[in-house]
Structure formats: C-alpha cells, structure tokens
Amino acid sequence: MSTDDVLQTFVAEARELLLGMEDSLLALERDPRDGEAISATFRAIHTIKGSAGLFSLDQLVAFAHVAETLLDLVRDGRVAVDGDLIALLLECSDYLGFLINQIAGEEVADAATQEARRPTLLARLQACIASSVAPSASQAESPRQAPPSAVPAAGEVADPVHNDAWHISLRFGPEVLKNGMDPASFLRYLGTLGEIAHITTLWQQMPAPEAMDAENCYLGFELDFRSEASREAIDSTFDFVRDDCRITLLPPRSSIDDYLKLIAEAPEGLERLGEILVASGALSQAELERALERQRQAAPPALGEMLIQEDGIPAPVVQAALEKQAKGRENRSAATRFIRVDAEKLEDLINQVGELVIAGASATLLSQRSGDTALIEAMAQVGRHVEEIRDRALSLRMVEIGESFNRFPRVVRDVSRELGKDIELVITGAETELDKTVVEKIGDPLMHLVRNSMDHGIESIEERLARGKPAQGRLSLHAYHESGSIVIEVADDGGGLKRDKILAKAMDRGLVAPGQALTDRDVFNLIFEPGFSTAEQVTNLSGRGVGMDVVRRNISALRGSIDIESQEGVGTTMRIRLPLTLAIIDGFLIQVADSAFVLPLDLVQECMELPDGERLQSRGQSSHYLDLRGEALPCLRLRNLLNLEGESSQRENVVIVQYGNRRAGLVVDRLLGEFQTVIKPLGQIFRHLRGFSGSTILGTGEVALILDVPTLVHDASGREARLLGESNAGQAIGSEQPA
C-alpha cells in the first residue's frame, strides 16, 4: 500500500469520525448531561488529530488540538454545555471537514471563505477555554485525573509491579512497512506526549539474513513512558496502525482490576498463558522462567495452578488469562472481517459478472439446440452457479440507506433554526439496503425534498398553534422494500398542498387548459414542472421554481418514480420508488410480433391467456379493459402501442404487472420465461424515448429492450382516471342545465 493509499484511508476514516462526532453533538444538544456523547466527541477529535500528526498535517493538528482542549474541559465539567457551544463545535466539525476535503485533493468552491473562518473559530474556542471554571475538589480527585492508588483496597491482593511509569509493549506486524507506516514515527509522536524513560528493541523474530525480506518489519519494543497525558491520549497514538500491530498498555501502579481488563483487551495472538501474563505485567520474565522450570521437574499441577500457589499471582488474573488463551485461536480468524475495496474494482467485478451472465445465456441456448441431454444438464448447473455468483456480487454493492439519511439530522437542525420553526426529524428503515450507486445519487433529491418540506410544508409555530396542532412539526424519513423496489417516503404534518392554488397557477401559465379534468395526482405532479412555484415570497431555501423538476429528472435517471399524497391542513407525503440495483435483474422475457422485450420479474404478478372475445373486441385498440375476476383491469396492447408490424399470434397472453398500488395488463404474443437480465443503458439519442428503461443482450446476441413498467402502468391507470374525471365533469355540467 502506497503512502497515497494510506492517506486516502485516513481521509475516509476521518470523514466517518466527523459524521459520528456530528451525531454525538446533536445527541448532546438534546441531553447536555450525556457523558457518552461528550466522550465520543472528544475521541473523534483526538483520533483525527493523532492520525493527522502521522502525516505532518500541521494545520489540521493545530486546529484540532484547540478544539480537543475545549472538549477536555467539557469532560471535566469546567465548561457548560449549551446551544452556543454545540453550534461552535458543529462549525468546527464543518471546518475540519473542509480541511480533510483539501487533503483529499477535492476542489472546494468556497475555499477562501472557509479558510477565512479559521481565525474567528480559533478566537471563539480560546474564549470558551479562557472562561472555564476551576475544577471542584471532587473533580480534582476523580478517578480519571488522579493516579491509581498504590495501596490495595480491603480484600485486594497487592500488585507485584511497582513501576511509576506507563509500560508499553509493541509488536509491529510484518506488513506495517508495506502498508506505508513507519514504526519510528509512532515513537516520535509518543515523545511529544511525555518522556520515554527506557526502551528495549526486540529483534528475536528476525530470520536468517538469506531469508530476510527488506520490506518486512521484524522488530518489537518494550518501553517505559512517563507522562501526565491520559490513557486515551497515549492509547490513541496507535489508532492508525492498530490493525497492524499488537499493543499492551499498562498504567503505573495498576490494580488487579486493571490487570483483568488489560488481559481481556489484549490483542489476539498472545496464546500462551505465560506470554499473556508477562505482557500484562502480572509477573516478570524471570518469574515465568522459574515457573516453567518447576513445571518441567514436576508434571501437574498445571502452570496456572503453580502460579497461584507458589508465586502468589492472584487467581482472578490467571483465570482471565486462561479464558483469553482459550479464545485466542477462535478470535484470530475473526480479526479481519472487514476490508476496504476500491469502488472501481467492485464496479469492474459487477461488469465482468454481467458479461458472464450474457455468455452463460448464450451457452445455455446452444446446449438446448444441440439436444445433448448431458450438456443441457451441465449448463443448467453452471447457470445456477452463475446466478449465485451474480447475487453475491451484487450484495457486495448493497449498503444501508442510512448512509444518506445520516446527513439530515444536522440539516433539519440548521434549517429549522434559520426558519424559526421547531421541527422533529424521525428516521425509520435506515437499515434498508440498496445499491451503493443509487444511495450516492439519491442524496441530492432527498435533500431538496426535505428542505422543501421544512420551508413550504410545515407551518410556523404560530400557525400550528392557531390550527390546534402541536408547536413542534414532524418530518419523517422512512424506507422499506416493496415488490423488488425500495420505497423512500418524505412526510410532514404541515399544511399540505393547496390543490386549487396549484391548478390556478398552472392555468395562468398555460400548463392546463380551461375545463380540463385532472385527478389529484395529476394536479400535484404539476409542481414538478420547470419553473413552477406557488410560493408568495422567495427565501434562501426555495420559492424560485427551481429544483422540483430536477428532483424528478434525477429520480427518473435512476429508473425510479415519485408520487405525491397530500391532504390540505394535514400534511404531505412524497413517495420515491427506486430499483434495488442498476446492474443485473431477474427478467421475464416476452415477444410481441418479431421483437423480444424484458419485464422486471419482481413486477410481474401473473400471466393468463387473453379470452377470444376480448381479443376480437380490442384488436384495433392500444388500450382497453379486461374483466379480471370481477375487477376492471386497464390493459395495453403492446403491438398497437409500439406500432409493431409482423404476423399476429393465434394465441395472445396478458402479463399482469403491478407497481406500487396500481396494476395493468400488457397484451403480448408469446411468453418466453425467466431471463437473467444485464441492464445496458440506452444511448443519448434514445434518452427521450418513453416506455423503455434500458436494453439487454440475449443469448442469441440480439438486443432486447427493457420495458419501463412504472411508465406503462401510469399511462394505463392515467387513462382510466382521466376518463372517470371527464365522466364526472360531464355529469356535473349536465346537472347545471336548466330543466
């Protein structure tokens, strides 16, 4: 791993820490006495500072150090937690994020503005530090500040170690140099926190010269370290290399409880009981050698019993070491469950799996044409394995939608304060998984919908109280799976959309003809027209008619759709439906005339033969209705709708598809069965083609278009709604005529 790769790893981890810090600060704003939130914020800043120090990122380290100092005073109770402090620390988090973006080499549009904030932020931090109160006597004697007592409590066995310095045992892994880390840099940084009183270099693991690899690290270190720094500060020195080394940290004058804790938390690999006890400081190397010699001279009792009986090692310490020894090998296998993979490598893997699916379909077709039974069976087995590989490869790209949701608590806090509103954010379904590409691209549309709901949807506190509502508004983000898709809802309990106002505005702009009958859905969808806005005044957030059309366009680009449900005075729900993946799906292959098409299998409900009477009645029509078990089902005849020419089939079929709560029937000539579909995007020349969401390659090498089921269902159900609306309008006009 190169230095650049290690730096990018630092950037990724620092961003994760800042997100966690932001969550902790928001939790602290809700409960200023939340000690865990204070500690989590301190750890995030401290870890970023320590890791940045390894790369000599002095500007970041200097700023983080001041923020860390303030947070240390907050932990001590010497600085009170209030809204102003939370706001300051959130601004510090934003500035650190700006610095990290610069380190990552990203272009920052407002870099000069961000950099100009630094002196102001530092001055505000220093002012808070200067205003800190002196610690009370009880705080000064707190366990975190006071060194552990050398006098054991009643019933406690005296500690055999009487060193007044920290003892640190380091065993750097052989790959640490290859991963771009210099062990000496950690020792140098440790020297900035205190004095290294004694250090011993361990070279016993070095192989013979002819077997030595110059890129491997074979050295370990045992050192005594005197410092006034906290355990957290010393321990976090090694955060950035923790996965590549074994670390044992023993505080000065530790109690037996400290031994137990250190043994339980010792890095994996110390599988021999004696090594664990030496690393924890419970006995010296000489004591261990004497105990081993006695064990060789006399068989049982076991080494653990001898250490208890003859050397006076406390039984709980030995028992803890035995438990550690028993779990050593088991835990080693689980030490590296997670690895970071470059997104481009993952994308390339998915593409190769897609090509494998296409090649497998071609081979399966050839085997079926050959008529060789053994070959057909073999290809069927290969097909099953290809399907498993496809599913597992796609699962690698599945991430939780919570990655997108996590940014909104901060957004809701800041925007609600700017608007002078009290808004509660409720997030559910954050664990729902979908394709990483979809998660990355849905963030901006969600951001616009959330901000729009807060600005236009939720009323001011005065309006809510006048309407008998709670002063605090409620904004909900909810995600769940439905019929092979993921549904994301942005809902508020605000004033709702004003149907009449939207319709009047649309008529003024010529979007709706006078007397045209529209359903509520059609009226609400008018807000997605470019430049459309009913806002009475323009704000910093909305009102210019820019954004909602971009939201729909971006969602459509993800092969998704957005629906609106609203009730005036009650609230509005924006419902986004997206495919789980944009790469490979299970498809259902159909044929119309001489052309093959693919339907997403998850949206197919059932298939049935079109009755002869219905077939004759609807032959010349693009759409009609079918009696499906007493229910009127809107149907689309694809041959007529797509204007396809070719010999008609003697027997037509209806494929019933469902998207959301709407169903429609598609009349086709032949049903060709299930088909693994690799989605290929349509070229730019076809970007305005309605009714198709992509293409795929069949086993024969021919191209088949993937039908856009949401659009077809919308068209079919839309015709039904418009006919019903026109019928109702006609009845209303007729009732107004004089008798």
Image (spheres, rainbow, N blue to C red):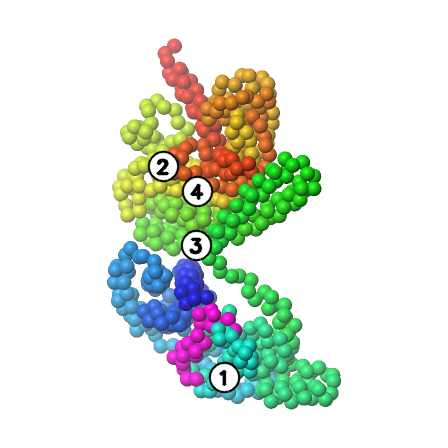
Residue at 52 percent of width and 18 percent of height: 619
Horizontal side of 310 relative to 212 (left or right) equals right
**Magenta span covers which residues?**
171-196
Q: Earlier in the sequence, mark 1 or mark 2?
A: 1
Helix, strand, or loop for circle 2? Answer: helix
Amino acid type, residue under disc 1 in the picture: Thr
| Type of amino acid at the residue the image marks with label 2 | Phe
Would residue 689 appear left or right of 614 to someone viewing this image? left
Q: Is residue 192 magenta?
A: yes
**Amino acid type indicated by mark 3:** Asn
Q: Which residue sits at x=63%, y=46%?
A: 382
How far apart are labels 4 and 2 at the CA level?
Answer: 17 Å
Residue 700 appears in the picture as rendered: yes
Residue 594 versus residue 443 in the image, above or below:
above
Judging by the rendered image, the residue that carries numbered circle 4 is 558
Q: Residue at x 38, y 38 (%)?
A: 684
**Mark 1 highlights which residue?**
201
Residue bearing mark 3: 406
Name the secondary structure under disc 1.
strand
- SS for tag 3? loop
Q: From this view, report whether residue 669 is shown above or below residue 306.
A: above
State which quadrant residue 667 falls in.
top right
Q: Residue at x 61, y 38 (%)?
A: 366
